[in-house]
Image: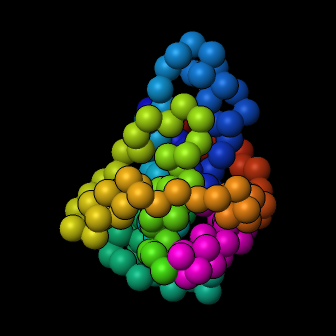
Amino acid sequence: MNHYNLVYREEEREMNPLCADQGVGLLPWSPLARGLLAGNRERDGERKTVRSRNDAFGDALYSDADFDVVDAVREVAKERGVPPAQVALAWLIGRPGVTAPIVGATKLTHIEDAVALETLKLDDEEVTRLEAPYRPHPVLGHS
C-alpha cells in the first residue's frame, strides 16, 4: 500500500518505478486525499464534513498549494458532468501499476464513484491539465 493521489505524487520518484520493475501492483491509500479531491475542504478554510473539520492528520499531509490541483479536478469534473471524486479516481486508476485504490466507502455515493471507473476514461489533455499544478511535497504519510 502506498500514499498516492493527485495532490501527493512523491511515490512516482522511486517507489512506483521499483514496484513496476519487480512486478508489484500498487494499492494506493487515500486516493481522494482524505476527501480534499472530493471537495470536503475549500481554499478559504471552510470544512464541509465532520471528518474534514477534525482531521489533524489530513491537515499535516496537504496544504493550500494543493488547492490548485483541486481546482483543476473541479474544472474537468464540471466539463464531464461528473463529481470531482470520479475524476480524481479515474486519474489514479490510469497510472501505471495501480491495480486498485483503497476507497473508504461509507456512503452509497462513494461506491458509485468507484464503480464509475469502469467507464470514465480521461484523455491525454485532461491528464495534463490535472497534473500541471502539482507541487512537490516532503515525503509524508509513512511511519
Q: Is residue 108 visible?
A: yes
Residue in the image at 68% along x and 41% along y? 10
Percent position (x, y) of residue 22?
Answer: 57, 13
Query: Most extreme residue toward the top, as rendered?
Result: 22
Q: Viewed as shown, does residue 53 lie left or right of 122?
A: left
Q: Is residue 108 above or below residue 101?
A: below
Q: Quadrant of the N terminus?
A: top left
Render colour scheme: rainbow
Residue nearest the observer in this picture, 127 or 15: 127
Please report the residue visible at 23 percent of the width from the left and 62 percent of the height from the top: 106
Q: Which residue is drawn at 53% across and 76% down?
A: 80
- The magenta region covers 62-80
- Indicate yes or no whether the magenta region holds residue 26: no
For the stretch drawn in magenta, the main secondary structure is helix
Task: Tell me if 71 is positioned left or right of 5 in this view.
Answer: right
Residue 57 visible in the displayed image: no
Q: Where is residue 51 in the image (x, y as percent from the top left)?
A: 35, 69
In the picture, measured across the screen, residue 22 lies left or right of residue 86, that is right
Q: Is residue 70 magenta?
A: yes
Residue 111 location in percent, x, y?
27, 60
Residue 19, picture quadrant: top right
> Tag count in the figure?
0
The image shows residue 82 at horizontal and vertical percentages of 45, 75
Q: Residue at 50% x, 36% y: name it.
A: 98
Q: In this view, does 15 lie to the left or right of 128?
A: left
The image quarter in which residue 65 lies: bottom right
Q: In this view, does 109 lie above or below 93?
A: below
